[in-house]
């Protein structure tokens, strides 16, 4: 393990494990749907453009969840609100398996988006406020790789269990791990030392915080909009691309997804760790620019092997850039609203980019259901936007998040 993550207390380790697992299971419940869009369309005799709204409404509702649960976490503490949030998103994901119609499913996915939107900011603040400052880069990458870890688990479930449980059963398999995680949080994880230290101090409204720090907030929202297009534009429709463009079945498409999520995990940890030495901006810009020459291999290859290699490399870079974000946003955030601010700007970026799946489906439909231009175009544009926004942006690497030792 990196020297950034040595000499820890047991409480710090528990906080990291719990936050990583919470983001993993949250992402798992989200990404299960990307593998079964075609099945849902067939089940309800709905066009793919309508089913893709299941991804869009989830992303659109996440800012509301970031606001609601973030304010609760600033007022009541990170730990109890994180437990509540996990219970809600796991229950709503489970309920999706019983949806009687496409309309009901879209409503459930919208509600799931509210719960999903609350988790990232709370888990990131709990972790970053608990760990030693020297460990932020490494743990930022480790925490963010919970997202591809969840995608990886979804790919494994799709490749192995889908023939047994069908698309409805796919929504139900995450409920037991979520309940285990809730028990672990309750019995093993302590409250954030920063929240305990400043308990009751976060009385300002979110609007006042945003008004006072509007330049940082605007910058962070623009940055996270580019990041959302970068991540979702290279992930969400890739299984559909493999299924429709190349005729891959569950084993082949799931196998490629497993490979590229391994790349995402390795990239997230690698660039997160590097950011502690070279700076947050430099690490992000390097990852974004290095993804550009990989895009032709990733989008235009024909064989399973080359597609898998391109997907591995592109997600190594995409999630490598993303691996810096938990530390970067928490360091940029006002101290009295750290439960709300990082998650809210993160999810507002997701809201602005929420139509990505529909945009890519529309572009593909104009090309005779050819997804290559849609994937490559969004990948190039978002990588360049990130390089410019972050390269000419700000950072506060190493800023104090609490004054008492964890």
Image (cartoon, rainbow, N blue to C red):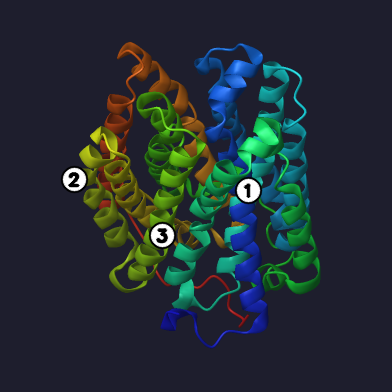
Residue 339 sits above or below residue 307 on the image: below
Residue most extreme to the bottom: 7
Residue carrying label 3: 268
At horizontal 53% and vertical 45% (from top left) the residue drawn is 155
Left or right, residue 234 beside residue 206: left
Contact flag, marks 2 and 3 (Cβ < 8 Å): no
Residue carrying label 2: 293
Residue carrying label 1: 26
367 or 190, which lies in front? 367
Residue 14 sits above or below residue 263 on the image: below
Residue 403 can be seen, yes or no: yes
Residue most extreme to the left: 293
Tell me residue 351's x, y (percent): 52, 33
For marks 2 and 1 on the same chain, the one whose residue lies earlier in the sequence: 1
Tell me residue 263's x, y (percent): 38, 56
Q: Split into 4 quadrants, where in the image is the C terminus?
A: bottom right
For the residues labelled 2 and 1, the Cα–Cα distance comes to 31 Å
């Amino acid at each position: 393990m990196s020297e950034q993550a040595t000499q820890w207390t047991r409480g710090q380790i528990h906080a990291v494990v719990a936050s990583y697992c919470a983001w993993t299971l949250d992402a798992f419940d989200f990404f299960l749907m990307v593998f079964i869009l075609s099945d849902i369309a067939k089940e309800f005799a709905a066009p793919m453009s309508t089913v893709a709204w299941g991804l869009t409404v989830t992303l659109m509702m996440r800012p509301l969840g970031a606001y609601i649960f973030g304010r609760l976490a600033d007022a009541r503490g990170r730990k109890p609100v994180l437990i509540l949030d996990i219970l809600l998103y796991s229950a709503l994901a489970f309920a999706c398996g019983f949806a009687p119609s496409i309309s009901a499913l879209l409503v459930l996915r919208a509600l799931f988006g509210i719960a999903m939107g609350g988790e990232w900011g709370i888990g990131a603040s709990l972790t970053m406020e608990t760990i030693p400052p020297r460990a932020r880069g490494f743990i930022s990458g480790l925490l963010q790789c919970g997202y591809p870890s969840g995608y990886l688990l979804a790919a494994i479930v799709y490749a192995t269990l889908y023939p047994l449980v069908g698309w409805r059963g796919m929504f139900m398999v995450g409920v037991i791990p979520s309940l285990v995680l809730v028990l672990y949080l309750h019995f093993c994880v302590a409250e954030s030392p920063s929240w305990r230290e400043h308990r009751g101090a976060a009385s300002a409204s979110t609007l006042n915080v945003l008004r006072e720090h509007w330049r940082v907030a605007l910058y962070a929202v623009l940055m996270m909009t580019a990041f959302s297009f970068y991540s979702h534009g290279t992930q969400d429709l890739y299984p559909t691309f493999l299924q429709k463009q190349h005729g891959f079945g569950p084993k082949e498409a799931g196998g490629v997804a497993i490979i590229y999520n391994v790349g995402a995990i390795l990239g997230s940890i690698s660039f997160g760790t590097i950011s502690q030495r070279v700076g947050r901006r430099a690490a992000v810009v390097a990852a974004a620019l290095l993804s550009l020459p990989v895009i032709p291999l990733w989008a235009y290859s024909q064989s399973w092997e080359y597609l898998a290699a391109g997907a591995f490399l592109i997600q190594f870079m995409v999630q490598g850039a993303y691996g810096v974000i938990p530390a970067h946003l928490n360091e940029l955030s006002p101290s009295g609203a750290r439960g709300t601010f990082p998650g809210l700007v993160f999810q507002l970026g997701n809201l602005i980019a929420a139509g990505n799946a529909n945009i890519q489906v529309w572009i593909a439909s104009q090309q005779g259901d050819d997804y290559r231009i849609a994937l490559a175009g969004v990948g190039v544009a978002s990588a360049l936007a990130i390089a410019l926004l972050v390269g000419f942006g700000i950072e506060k690497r190493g800023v104090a998040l609490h004054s008492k030792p964890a």
